[in-house]
Amino acid sequence: MEPVLNAHNKEEYPPMHTAEHILNATMVRMFGCPRSKNAHIEKKKSKCDYFLEKAPTDGQVAAIEAAVNEVISRNLDVRIEFMTREEAAEIVDLSKLPEDVSETLRIVRVGDYDACACIGAHVGNTSEIGTFKILSHDFNDGVWRVRWKVVQ
């Protein structure tokens, strides 16, 4: 029986959307911050906003880019699992989900690096993403905005 999920209103570009998952996990690991508060994912370029106490240094920005590319280079499988909200709450942060979220959630796993509740489109393996490149970034009022793309 196919699970009943919330409808999705956007068609993502799978390489960029999967790279966003890796970027989010990298930010959580490197800075201990939550996943992006806002994300705008497009084929040409994307942006994510993170709550940070201070702006990352140029060295840290280079380290973020290098870390994301290192994960991409691992050729990790991207897997989809379905589970109840209760089961999902034990492994992923559900705080950004809408109140009317379905009882069954779709969890996207990028190898053993990231797990996230998501209904978007993703690649099957990180080898399909390309190279992650940070284009620009700025810091205002505790929010670090990073603009990035992937190059095939």
Image (spheres, grey):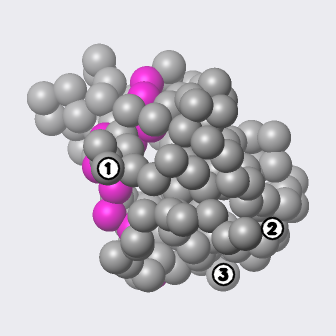
Could you tell me the amino acid type at mark 2?
A: Asn
Along the polypeptide, which appears first: circle 1 or circle 3? 1
What whole-number distance in Å separates the C-alpha atoms at marks 1 and 2? 31 Å
Look at the image and tell me whether residue 38 can be seen.
yes
Residue 30 rendering spot, x and y as whole percentages? 57, 26
Name the residue beneath numbered marker 1: 100
Q: In the rendered view, would you say 43 is above or below 66?
A: below
Q: Is residue 25 left or right of residue 54?
A: right
Along the polypeptide, which appears first: circle 1 or circle 2? 1
* Residue at image point 74% right, 40% down: 113
Magenta-span inclusion, residue 41: yes
**Which is the main secondary structure of the residues drawn in magenta?**
loop
Q: Which residue is at the front of the view, 120 or 87?
A: 87
Name the residue beneath numbered marker 3: 152
Residue 119 rendering spot, x and y as whole percentages? 52, 63
Along the polypeptide, which appears first: circle 3 or circle 2? 2
- Local secondary structure at mark 1: loop
Q: Which residues are magenta?
A: 33-43
Could you tell me the amino acid type at mark 3?
A: Gln
Could you tell me the amino acid type at mark 1?
A: Asp
What whole-number distance in Å separates the C-alpha atoms at marks 3 and 2? 14 Å
